[in-house]
Amino acid sequence: MGRGPHAGDGVAGRVLIPRRFNGPPASANGGYTCGLIARYVGGPADVSLRSPPPLDTALELERTDEGKLRLWHREVLVAEGSAADPPDVEPPVRPTVAQAREAQRRHPWLDRGGRHPFNACYVCGATRHDGLGNDDLRRLAQETVRALGTGVVALAGTGPDGVKAGIAVAVSKDLVAKGVTADAIARPAAKALGGGVGKGADAVVGGGPNSEGIEEALRLVHEQRAAWEQ
């Protein structure tokens, strides 16, 4: 089995969960932690938490001889996962930005000022306003494209200030070789957000002050991607 210093393929190494991904105040969000393990499974995964994941702490990732992945904090097992059969479920319909904001406005915990045991949770905390910055968006888009193998990925949302909007577009290498470029796909979308993007074939990031334009920006990305496929 592998356990110890970080290996280049990510199957044995050290993992650190930044404090901003907390669930309860002193431990990581369970869904984020399970997703972190699933990333290294390389396909459909079955992941279970075994103990609260510590934050800002070096954890050891281990692959057993049986192919299971285990996350350790010293001698305490934090989580373990393995390959699973693909789920036979339909993905949920993605809400529009307007629908998401209306749902947020009706959040029952807001009536109590966001005060509940997990009010600062990365996922369900009603008082959290720290969205992903542009560098985070770019990194996540690139990692998603690598996981897919081929395709175009666009991510958009409000930034850490809760006002400005950002967008990141990543394109797989095989499509770049065919002439598809991330900046050409992202440029109209960034304009809808009141800004622009830099130059880049495989990945770009940009945005502007118009967070109300996120839905239109994503529509424009889809439109540009469809044009490249013709």
Image (cartoon, grey):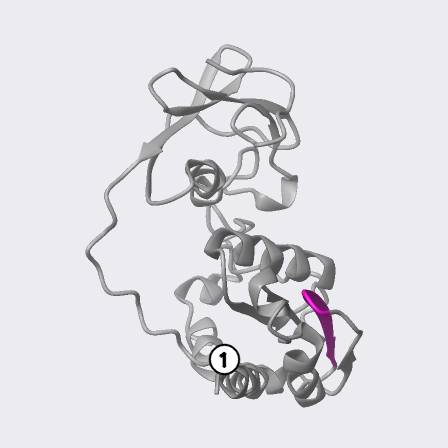
From the viewer's perspective, is 202 left or right of 126? right
Q: Residue most toward the top?
A: 75
Residue 151's spot in the image, x, y percent? 50, 66
Task: Magenta stretch: give its range.
Answer: 201-208
* Among the 4 quarters of the image, the one containing residue 103: bottom left
Q: Residue at x 46, y 28 (%)?
A: 52
From the viewer's perspective, is 141 left or right of 200? left
Q: Residue at x 39, y 74 (%)?
A: 94
Q: Note whether 214 is above or below 87 in the view shown.
A: below
| Residue 110 visible here | yes
From the viewer's perspective, is 153 left or right of 167? left
* Among the 4 quarters of the image, the one containing residue 99: bottom left
Q: Residue at x 50, y 62 (%)?
A: 150
Q: Residue most toward the right?
A: 198
Q: Decide whether residue 205 is among the magenta residues.
A: yes
Residue 193's spot in the image, x, y percent? 68, 85
Q: Residue at x 74, y 87 (%)?
A: 194
Residue bearing mark 1:
97
The number of numbered discs placed on residues in the rendered structure image is 1
Q: Residue most toward the front?
A: 178
Q: Note whether 208 is above or below 6 in the view shown.
A: below
* Among the 4 quarters of the image, the one containing residue 180: bottom right
Q: Note whether 220 is above or below 8 in the view shown.
A: below
Secondary structure under badge 1? helix
- Residues 109 and 34: in front is 34
Q: Note whether 149 is above or below 100 in the view shown.
A: above
Amino acid type at circle 1 is: Val
Residue 98's spot in the image, x, y percent? 48, 84
Q: Main secondary structure of the magenta part?
A: strand
Q: Decide whether residue 74 is among the magenta residues.
A: no
- Residues 167 and 151: in front is 151
